[in-house]
Image (tube, rainbow, N blue to C red):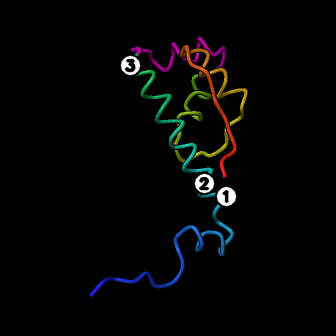
Amino acid sequence: MGKKNIGSSFDDFLKEEAMHEDATAVALKRVIAWQIAEAMKAQQITKTELAKRMHTSRAALNRLLDEEDPSLTLTTLASAAAALGKKVNIAFAA
């Protein structure tokens, strides 16, 4: 006997509870922080060196790499990307 889905999807639940946007923001921040950390590792760049390249403090870089802190400005993201020799691509998806 095949299993049937009962109820709504998890996305529907998050939307009903008005938590979808927050959950999406946290998930996006985790991916961005991971990508920056991986680029740093691949290029053997320390936090101190990346902060220097970004013309910011190490504390600010730590906030950028903090997966639990969803706040992030496009300026900071663009600065990190440039410091790592990368570009940022942002698009709305359906």
In the rendered image, residue 50 lying in the magenta stretch gets the answer yes
Quadrant for the N terminus, please: bottom left
Q: Amino acid at mark 3?
A: Ala
Q: Amino acid at mark 1?
A: Glu
Q: Are marks 2 and 1 in contact (CB under 8 Å)?
A: yes
Task: Return the x and y of residue 55 as percentages of the image width and height.
Answer: 66, 14
Secondary element at image label 1: helix
Give me the residue at 66% from left, 52% from top: 94
Task: Return the x and y of residue 52 as percentages of the image width and height.
Answer: 59, 12
Secondary element at image label 2: helix
From what the image shows, is residue 82 above or below residue 32?
A: above
From what the image shows, is residue 81 above or below residue 27?
A: above
Q: CA distance from mark 3 to mark 2?
A: 27 Å
What is the magenta range?
A: 43-57
Q: Furthest residue to the bottom?
A: 1
Which residue is denoted by mark 2 in the rendering?
24
Q: Residues within 10 Å of mark 3 (few under 14, many from 20)?
A: few
Q: How many marks?
A: 3
Left or right, 33 with respect to 82, comes to left
Q: CA distance from mark 1 to mark 3?
A: 31 Å
Which residue is denoted by mark 1 in the rendering?
21
Q: Residues within 10 Å of mark 2 (few under 14, many from 20)?
A: some
Q: Which mark is residue 42?
A: 3
From what the image shows, is residue 32 above or below residue 51?
A: below
Q: Furthest residue to the left?
A: 1
Q: Are marks 3 and 2 in contact (CB under 8 Å)?
A: no
Task: Return the x and y of residue 60 as percentages of the image width and height.
Answer: 62, 28
Tell me which corner region of the image, top left, top right, bottom left or bottom right, holds residue 18: bottom right
In the rendered image, residue 90 lying in the magenta stretch gets the answer no
